[in-house]
Image: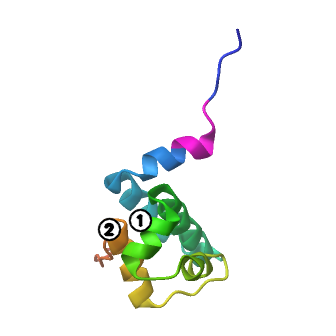
Amino acid sequence: MPKRVRDYEEDLVEKLKDAEFAAEYLNVSLEDSDEGAEERFLIALGQVAKAHGMTAVAERAGMARQAVYRALSETGNPELSSLKALLDAMGLKLAVEQKPKAS
């Protein structure tokens, strides 16, 4: 009998339901500074939102579901208030840290 392999996206969705994993996933995404980094962050945030249920996240954030999809698309440009509301709806928060000093 062939071995069943779990679909990558299904596994990722399950892991992204965990707030600690989701926070680390998003933080790693934010570390990129090359071209397209902002778009990749929005994609990652969209994946976390899908893991939590896009409709439920939109409701908790006080946003229309379509507005959430638009904001988190590759061409999206969410306002800071929208970003904070979405993160809050997923049990996450925005934070700022000092960069490590170059040696």
Residue 49 lies, in percent from the top left, at 48, 64
Tell me the kind of residue under disc 1. Asn
The residue lying at 37 percent from left, 81 percent from top is 84
Q: Name the residue under label 1.
A: 27
The residue lying at 44 percent from left, 64 percent from top is 26
Q: In this view, does 23 lie above or below 73?
A: above
Q: Determine the image quadrant of residue 24.
A: bottom left
Residue 33 lies, in percent from the top left, at 55, 75
Q: Is residue 51 in the magenta section?
A: no
Indicate which label's residue lies in the foreground, 2 or 1. 2
Q: In this view, does 98 lie above or below 27?
A: below
Q: Is residue 8 in the magenta section?
A: yes
Residue 102 in view, yes or no: no
Range shown magenta: 6-11
Magenta stretch secondary structure, dominant: helix
Q: Name the residue under label 2.
A: 92
Q: Determine the image quadrant of residue 103.
A: bottom left
